[in-house]
Amino acid sequence: MLSWVKNRNGTFDRSIAFERLMRDSYRQAYSVAYRLTGDSTDAEDLVQEAYVRAFRFFHRYDDKLPFSSWMYRIIANAHIDLIRRKGKIKTSSLDHSGSDGMQAFEIADHSNVPGNDMINESFSESVQGGLNQMNPEFRLAVVLADVEGLSYEEVADIMETSVGTVRSRIHRGRVQLRNYLMKTAPESYGRHADVL
Amino acid sequence: MSCNTSQSKLSAYVDGEMSGMEMQSIRRHVSHCPDCQGEVDGLKSVQMVLRGLPPTPEAPPNLPDRITASIKTTRRHYLRYALVVAVPLCAFAVIFYPRSTPKPTQDRDLVIHRQLAKDQIFDAGTDSTSGASLVHYANLESR
């Protein structure tokens, strides 16, 4: 509840309320933005743009709902707009096949780099690379469900779609990521798969 | 259940995001279908990889200040934009607003009523409201 955020006159102070919520939530917002963009500069731009939008529409925010969920929705929309504006939608399907029927990605396989720490770091880069290659809607659904740990219903609310659509996007996103990792970092991925 | 129908539900099954009846149905199917069992294992491993990702880099500590500055800049921009729109609108309103507006009906009735009362005094030599003779008023004024 934001009713405690009042100025000297006893009236609700919108700017103070927003700033407090922003300072409490910006780290989480940045983390999601980083997973969506795969780049720290782009993540900063995205977070900044999302909060400017959030402030503009703050009068529509229902404080009975978590502010972070509301922010996720704005970040998701701002992300789509940002990549459209930059003309960066190169959402080549991860299932895309080359002329020889093999998958046509030319990405270095870091999985043979010696040393466990290096493998972990390079493997996480491969995972981020797989996320970056995904369709933005699949990526958002996968990041929210698997990285942020939200339920399908929460993801559906943020993406303003049905639970059935979320279910399909998460499944397709995971399958694409698995195929990508099997192609680009088979040894590291194989080790994780063997743990099961 | 055919494999085609279960494929799209396997992620939800892995996440436990379906009803108990559906879970049981898919569990039964997976236990008899090596392909779907392999698919479930693959989905679980992807899920484990994503959950095990190292934390993202820390957000820059000055990011909130930059956001606040950006909001202020945007507000100034909107204010300037609003002024650009509002000033011509006000000028238009001042130029074209009718200069002589008719007085409200109630005021107009009051004026007519008073004028009639004066006429009555003039005509009859009596106060229209009290009926007193104007001589009475003349005496009061002379004191």
Image (cartoon, helix red, strand yellow):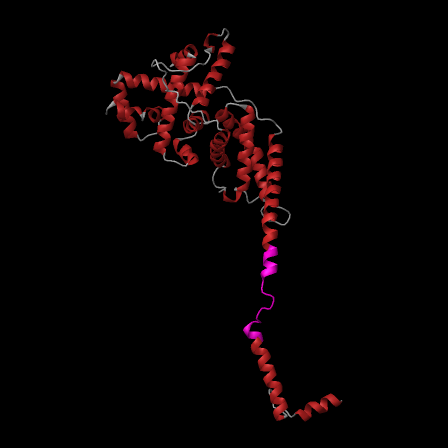
Identify whether A90 is placed above or below B109.
Answer: above
Snapshot quadrant of residue A173: top left
The answer to whether residue A41 is visible is yes
Image-based side of A85 in relation to A19, left or right: left
Q: Position of residue B64 (x, y in %)?
A: 60, 32
Tell me the quadrant of the picture where the C terminus of chain B can be found. Answer: bottom right
Identify whether A62 is placed above or below B66.
Answer: below
* Image: magenta residue range: B90-107
Q: Residue at x 61, y 60 (%)?
A: B95
Image-based side of A13 in relation to B138, left or right: left
Residue furthest toward the left? B1
Q: Position of residue A143 (x, y in %)?
A: 44, 26
Q: Position of residue A130 (x, y in %)?
A: 44, 20
Image-based side of B27 in relation to A161, left or right: left
Q: Nearer the viewer, residue A91 or A119?
A: A91
Residue furthest toward the right? B143
Q: Position of residue A125 (x, y in %)?
A: 49, 17
Image-based side of B119 in relation to A127, left or right: right
Residue furthest toward the top? A114
Q: Residue at x 44, y 22 (%)?
A: A133
Q: Nearer the viewer, residue A27 or A102?
A: A102
Snapshot quadrant of residue A19: top right
